[in-house]
Image (spheres, grey):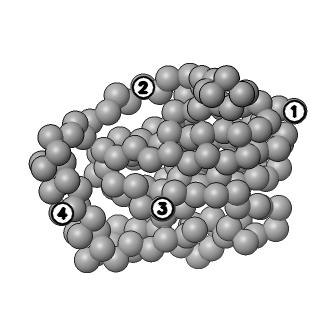
Amino acid sequence: MYRVLQPRALAAISVVAVFVSACTGAQTSPSPTAVGPSPTNGAGATTVEVNLQEWAVVPASTSAAAGEVTFQVTNTGPEDVHEFVVLRTDLDPGALPVDETGAVTETGAGIEVIDEIEDIPVGETQELTVTLEAGKYVLLCNIYDETESEAHYTMGMRSPFDVSG
């Protein structure tokens, strides 16, 4: 979902992330290198690690077999909150329809939103499991930061992803 972050929301997210990190002693700088897809459950399911960073979406693999795919998504920052959106489309990943801010029009022609994870703080990892049919997909961050006037998609946060039958 196209999200606009307000300055107060950004400040609140930053404070919560710092507090949680301090209280848990968690590391907030995961490795910037991704590991390849790995089968899980022995049932043909696939796990793909994905790093979100300024300004790229870096999946360990840009393809998977049709079926259940779990994306393990880590925001490696270093500064911005990101989201992770899975779109099915035959359109070129760099030529998706955008609005006046540069954010992808997720209801645009030729685009099907499969699922997403919203507002992933820096240093946090979240999982998204989806069932994907054979076809072409785009993995992206579609946040528009009003304070910085930055559309993460147009800053380069997108990657093609192919699913084979």
Of the numbered discs 2 and 1, the one sitting upstream in the chain is 2
Three-letter residue code for mark 1: Gly
Three-letter residue code for mark 4: Val
Vertical placement of residue 161 versus 149, above or below: above
Q: Which residue is mark 4?
A: 15
Q: Is residue 56 visible?
A: no
Three-letter residue code for mark 2: Thr
Image disc number at residue 118:
3
Residue 77, position in %: x, y?
Answer: 33, 46
- In which quadrant of the rendered view does residue 26 lie? top left
Three-letter residue code for mark 3: Glu
| C-alpha span from label 3 to label 4 | 18 Å
Residue found 55% across the figure and 70% down from its top: 2
Comparing marks 2 and 4, which lies closer to the viewer?
Answer: 4
Callout 3–callout 1 Cβ contact below 8 Å: no
| C-alpha span from label 3 to label 2 | 22 Å
Which one is nearer the viewer's eye here, 65 or 111?
A: 65
Vertical placement of residue 80 versus 3, above or below: above
Q: Which residue is mark 2?
A: 33
| C-alpha span from label 4 to label 1 | 44 Å
Disc 1, SS: loop
Comparing marks 3 and 2, which lies closer to the viewer?
Answer: 3
Disc 2, SS: loop
| C-alpha span from label 2 to label 4 | 27 Å
On-image quarter of the N terminus = bottom right
Classify mark 1: residues with Cα within 10 Å, few (<14), some (14-19) or many (20+).
Answer: few
Q: Which residue is mark 1?
A: 165
